[in-house]
Amino acid sequence: MTTPDAVVIGPAATGPGRSEPGPGAEPARRNDLILRLLGLLVAVVAAVASGVLEVFLVPLRIGTVLVGVSVLLAVLGNLTLVWFTYAVTGRRWAVALPALAWFAVFLPASGQTAEGDLLLTGNNWVGITTTLAGSVAFAIGASRLILGRHPPDLGLGVGRRP
């Protein structure tokens, strides 16, 4: 008759797949943190670049008609930034940093310079709509994350995290 193996709970239960990490865990954690921070930096820089591009595309016209291409870029770009930021960091709070960077571009663009120049004017529907639509895109993306509806895993090694 054989006896069952003893189950050890606590500090004695070590080894691969158990409570204590293996020998290469510290460098792997450090590398993971570095990659997450670099991904967050990329997201913030992309948000600033996106905001600048959208601000300068606000007065775009074909003939005498304003073209709202910056509205489309703001919505698609900001939703993509939400997805990317969460995918590379795995943290919901991190989505706030690219949103703040994007707002940091739009806020001064809505005021006058010392010379009296305006980038976003109050009588331009594209500028107002871009600001509103970009803000709403960040809000919708962040609220979906907060409510637990994570971005889909697109098979790129990013997306849902356990």
Image (tube, rainbow, N blue to C red):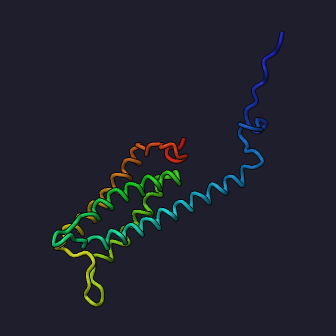
- Image-quadrant location for residue 115: bottom left
Residue 21 in the image, given as x and y percentages of width and height = 73, 45
Q: Number of numbered discs present? A: 0
Can you say which quadrant of the picture contains the N terminus?
Answer: top right
Residue at the farthest right position: 1
Residue at the farthest bottom position: 115
21 lies above or below 101 = above
Can you say which quadrant of the picture contains the C terminus?
Answer: top right
User: What residue lies at 72% left-to-right and 55% top-to-bottom?
Assistant: 27
Left or right: residue 25 versus residue 102 is right
User: What residue lies at 30% left-to-right and 70% top-to-bottom?
Assistant: 57
Residue 60 in the image, given as x and y percentages of width and height = 25, 71
User: What residue lies at 45% left-to-right and 65% top-to-bottom?
Assistant: 46
User: What residue lies at 63% left-to-right and 54% top-to-bottom?
Assistant: 32
Left or right: residue 10 versus residue 63 is right
Left or right: residue 2 versus residue 70 is right
81 lies above or below 109 = above
- Image-quadrant location for residue 137: bottom left
Residue at the farthest front position: 63
162 lies above or below 137 = above
Residue 143 in the image, given as x and y percentages of width and height = 36, 50
Q: Toward the viewer: 72 or 89?
A: 72
Q: Toward the viewer: 99 or 73?
A: 73
Residue 85 in the image, given as x and y percentages of width and height = 47, 56
